[in-house]
Amino acid sequence: MNLNMDDRLATDAAELLLNAIQSQGAALVGGEWSVRFDHHFHTEQFSSYDARATNFRPDWPPVQTENLRLGSGTGERGTFGPATLWDLEKTKPWYPTYFGNREPILSIGDSIFWQYLKQLGHKLGRIETVIGRYYSSPNAQAEFRPHNDNENLRQHKLSNISFSQMVSNRKHAGTQSAAAQPKGVQPQIGMPPRSRVEAQSQQLGMRYLKLFGRTVPSQPTV
């Protein structure tokens, strides 16, 4: 499961999503989100509730409205939410992180992942329950900033290298066999970190591999 640093899950959200993905036989499931425009909710604890207690407006970016919902769990937005839960046995440990030209995916990673799962014939599910609070701030969020993701995807397709693979697998994602490559993904061997943030992410991946008792692969340097 993924979760943005500025969003928050209800205390029972993970349990609800787990029940839903099992009962629906889905590879991925998402829920509904309350849209918030301040940081006050970041320290609050809250439980899930019925999405019918909220209102939907299709504006994007969202326009401040009382009891506004995102429209992901109801399907009104066409998305599955800023955070979803997926079954690694069905999806495999790969999540879109880079394009084939080694540029990082800045904004449309979720959408790429959903389309990838649909192309593989997997079922994607929703629950019409508010499971979290989504922070909306056009000046501070990647989904509202200018990017070339769509053009990079069209020209360069996707890299097979994924941070989630490095954490989940014994081998580095860059050594993945051609037979295991996600469809439409460009194979690449190794990728040095492009920035201090990426270097720190790789170091974090190594720590988790050690915690899981797995072999730590050698990493390319900048």
Image: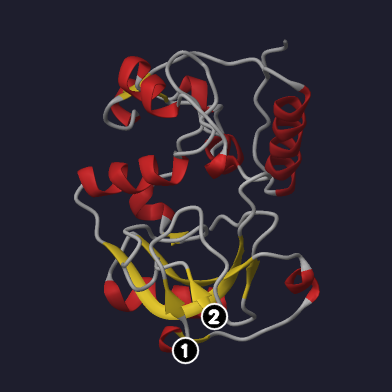
Q: Residue at x 34, y 48 (%)?
A: 114
Among the two numbered marks 2 and 1 on one chain, the one whose residue lies closer to the N terminus: 1
* Disc marking residue 53: 1
> Where does the image place residue 208, in percent across and percent down from the top left?
71, 44
Q: Residue at x 68, y 31 (%)?
A: 216
Residue 23 is left or right of residue 33, and the answer is: left
Q: Nearer the viewer, residue 13 or 206?
A: 13
Residue 190 is left or right of residue 210, and the answer is: left
Q: Please give the residue where the numbered disc 2 appears in the rendered image.
A: 67
> Where does the image place residue 31, in percent across and percent down from the top left?
44, 71
Contact, mark 2 vs mark 1 (Cβ under 8 Å): yes
Residue that lies at the very extreme toward the top in this rendered image: 222
Q: Residue at x 54, y 80 (%)?
A: 67
Observer able to see residue 22 = yes
Quarter location, residue 156: top left
Look at the numbered disc 1 and give the secondary structure of its residue.
Answer: helix
Quarter location, residue 206: top right
